[in-house]
Image: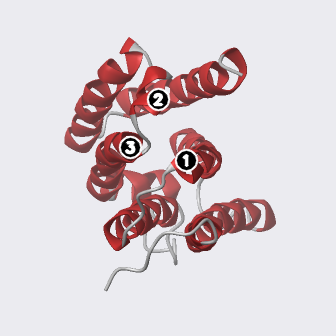
């Protein structure tokens, strides 16, 4: 039997989501701390470090953006389950950036390139999850996005496919720089222009 929604339920849902997102952020921060503590343990990579920054920004943005769920009044277990799976996908992205242990690979870039199918497969899933998440928040939420949102998702999915297909360093560097630039632009438009 489904429990009726009460306003007290939303903080409970955010706490569970926050635990998973918190673990993801912790994984990234511990990984960066490990790089500082043991700089010679494995060779560093600009592509890897840029993805670390990009996924950290993604996690922070996701957590802030989920405040919009407070407006949702038709809660049920399916929505809760969906949100937990979404946060788990984000957590897995973070864990794929810092393997344990790294000595089996020739540095972080070698690991990233060998596991790029997993990373970009999960990353592609976040685009699909984002659409569902946005639909859950209702039509008012869609009005904030504009036309570029309808372009962002298919372009993101295509770039994920390209990243799985090729190990070309220049292409991977271009994709992560594009993602970082888009995120910063998106955050600026959502939280400063529409404020």
Name the residue at 56% across, 69% down: 6
Which secondary structure, mark 2? helix
Viewer-proximal residue among 119 and 101? 119
Instruction: Tell me: residue 123, above or below residue 92.
Output: above
Most distant residue in the right direction: 37
| Residue linked to disc 2 | 140
Name the residue at 76% across, 64% down: 33
Q: Which mark is residue 130?
A: 3
The tag earlier along the polypeptide, 3 or 2, is: 3
| Residue linked to disc 1 | 71
Looking at the rendered image, the quarter that the C terminus falls into is top right
Q: Residue 68, located in which quarter of the rendered image?
A: top right
Q: Residue 131, located in which quarter of the rendered image?
A: top left
Distance (Cα) linking label 3 and label 2: 15 Å
Viewer-proximal residue among 51 and 78? 78
Q: Tell me the mark number nearer the camera, choosing from 3 and 2.
A: 2
Distance (Cα) linking label 1 and label 2: 10 Å
Instruction: Tell me: residue 89, above or below residue 99.
Output: above
């Amino acid at each position: 039997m489904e429990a009726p929604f009460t306003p007290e339920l939303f903080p409970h849902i955010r706490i569970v989501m926050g635990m998973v997102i918190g673990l993801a952020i912790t994984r990234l921060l511990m990984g960066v701390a490990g790089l500082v503590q043991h700089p010679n343990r494995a060779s560093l990579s600009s592509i890897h470090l840029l993805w670390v920054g990009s996924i950290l920004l993604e996690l922070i943005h996701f957590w802030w953006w989920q405040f919009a769920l407070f407006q949702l009044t038709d809660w049920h277990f399916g929505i809760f389950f969906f949100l937990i799976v979404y946060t788990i996908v984000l957590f897995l992205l973070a864990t794929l950036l810092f393997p344990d242990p790294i000595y089996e690979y020739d540095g972080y870039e070698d690991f990233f390139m060998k596991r790029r199918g997993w990373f970009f497969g999960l990353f592609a899933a976040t685009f699909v999850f984002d659409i569902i998440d946005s639909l859950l928040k209702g039509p008012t939420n869609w009005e904030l996005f504009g036309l570029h949102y309808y372009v962002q998702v298919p372009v993101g999915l295509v770039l994920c496919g390209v990243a799985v297909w090729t190990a070309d360093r220049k292409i991977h560097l271009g994709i992560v720089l594009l993602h970082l630039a888009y995120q910063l632009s998106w955050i600026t438009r959502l939280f400063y222009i529409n404020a």
